Amino acid sequence: MMDFLTPVTWADALAVKADRPEAVPVAGGTDVMVELNFHRRRPAALLDLTRVPELAAWGRDGDVLRVGAGVSYTRLIEELGGLLPGLAAASRTVGSPQIRNRGTLGGNLGSASPAGDGHPPLLAAGAVVELASVRGTREVPVADFFTGPKRSVLAPDELIAAVLVAPADGPEQFAKIGTRNAMVIAVSSFALALHPGRRSVGTGIGSAAPTPRRAPEAEEFAAAHLPWDGPGPLDPDLARRFGELVSAAAAPIDDVRGTAAYRRHSLSVLARRTLTWAWEELCE
Amino acid sequence: MTCTVNGVPRTADDVWEGESLLYVLRERLGLPGSKNACEQGECGSCTVYLDGTAVCSCLVAAGQAVGREVVTVEGLSGGPDAEPGPVQRAFLAAGAVQCGFCTPGLIVAVDDLLSRNPHPTDPQIREALAGNLCRCTGYEKIMEAVRLAAGGQA
Ligand SMILES: Cc1cc2nc3c(=O)[nH]c(=O)nc-3n(C[C@H](O)[C@H](O)[C@H](O)COP(=O)(O)OP(=O)(O)OC[C@H]3O[C@@H](n4cnc5c(N)ncnc54)[C@H](O)[C@@H]3O)c2cc1C
Ligand code: FES
Ligand code: FES
């Protein structure tokens, strides 16, 4: 018999997780329920997070936005599209309306799939994951959150509370390669954030390494060479070089969705295109 | 397990809280309208409203639905013996039903779309129905049905 634990406050949820660290959290269930339905997993306990109001809230916290782990993709699109356009763009590509209505950002992080569409824009924006347990709260940069395919630094007694991320201060882009337009897991994906105020660039690569990751050399190259002083058309060689550096930062594998070589190639194309679009947006 | 289904409080016994809401509806509450074709969120044939939001009932744990409001395709007309609702009539009029397996989920998804956007464009219809697979019709008749329902012509 499996226990079904239903805390109704955040403090309760943390206490229950401390008491039953083996309990599997379930938010939107769009990953967990597939595993249960196919008997791939028989957890001793499920910990339902959908009755914890704190998780479903977002708001400003000083200079950053604090987005609760339980906020769905549909709400990220409808309520945060203006403040976090990169994350909203990625959210629009997730599954179907039914999946976006139910699936959450916290669940995406919890699954820690290298192909999770929420991860590249969080990397590009320099977001921080807030983890909590009865022991206290810690903040982990998204870039340090993932430790391998479907693995993260989340401890057994911890829950993901929220994501802390600054509102966009420049153009943000997200692009994804899949086999058709809807309902696809990314073959490769790429997110870009431009910060014209501090002349820096953020990147996030999806589906092309054991974990989502940044492309630091590409970021430095673009920051140093973009014509910040006199914004005008982008030098195609600069965009191409940026694409090469992004592609070089990946460590893809061959799998059923695509070959490593195709992933590298598609990434360089996505990176070149998103930089071009973002720069055009900046010049408008 | 107790929740409200189509406006009526219902109780199901012997529910394992990790089973899906779809299973509860079909096997324990005798509401076979929502279909089970994949149990992994891919086909949309199990689409229901949960507290007013369209979701795949195969991905909702029974325990998560406790105390919530569920509306199934059966709730969109007056009941099994009542007249079909407007979206249902449009599907019949457009010939958008072949084997019918996908139809209940589509009816809920279209109902949801039209409640948010009464006059959707074709791309908006396609986007809204991206999570509902139909193996028979090739979707053109379904598009036609949605246009009919939106025009109030059915
Ligand atoms: C048909 C279909 C299409 C999909 N398409 C996409 C897609 O295009 N892109 C994409 O990225 N994903 C996709 N997914 C996967 C899934 O929808 C996402 O990963 C989603 O973000 C999961 O969120 P959830 O709330 O449903 O998670 P759940 O299934 O509830 O949980 C997922 C994992 O996170 C853990 N968890 C959840 N919340 C917390 C928390 N607060 N603290 C700690 N652990 C937590 C759970 O224990 C579990 O391990 C798809 C899934 C389906 C079924
Ligand atoms: S049975 Fe639920 S989506 Fe297919
Ligand atoms: S009518 Fe047969 S699956 Fe759609």
Image (cartoon, coloured by chain):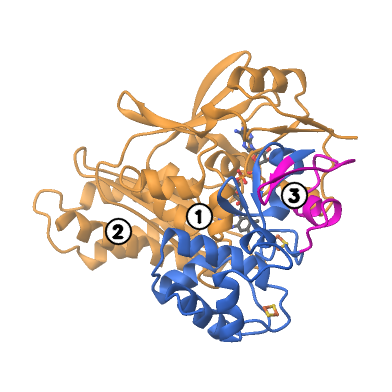
Q: Colour of chain A?
A: orange
Select label 3 or label 2 by which is in front: 3
- Visible residue check, residue A106: yes
Q: Amino acid at mark 2?
A: Leu
Q: Give how far across and how far down residue B1 sits, in percent.
A: 80, 38
Relative to A164, residue A40 above or below: below
Label 1 belongs to which residue?
A: A250
Relative to A265, residue A154 above or below: above
**Marking on residue B21:** 3
Q: Give how far across and how far down residue A281 sits, in percent.
A: 21, 57
Select label 2 or label 1 by which is in front: 2
The answer to whether A27 appears left or right of A57 in the picture is: right
Q: State how far apart marks 2 and 1 are (Cα).
A: 17 Å
Q: Colour of chain B?
A: blue
Relative to B1, residue A117 above or below: below
The segment highlighted magenta reads B3-32
Label 2 belongs to which residue?
A: A275
| Occupied quadrant, residue B121 | bottom left
Seen at 63% across and 30% down, the residue is: A154
The answer to whether A268 appears left or right of A73 in the picture is: left
Label 1 and label 3 in one chain: no
Seen at 73% across and 81% down, the residue is: B99
Seen at 59% across and 22% down, the residue is: A10
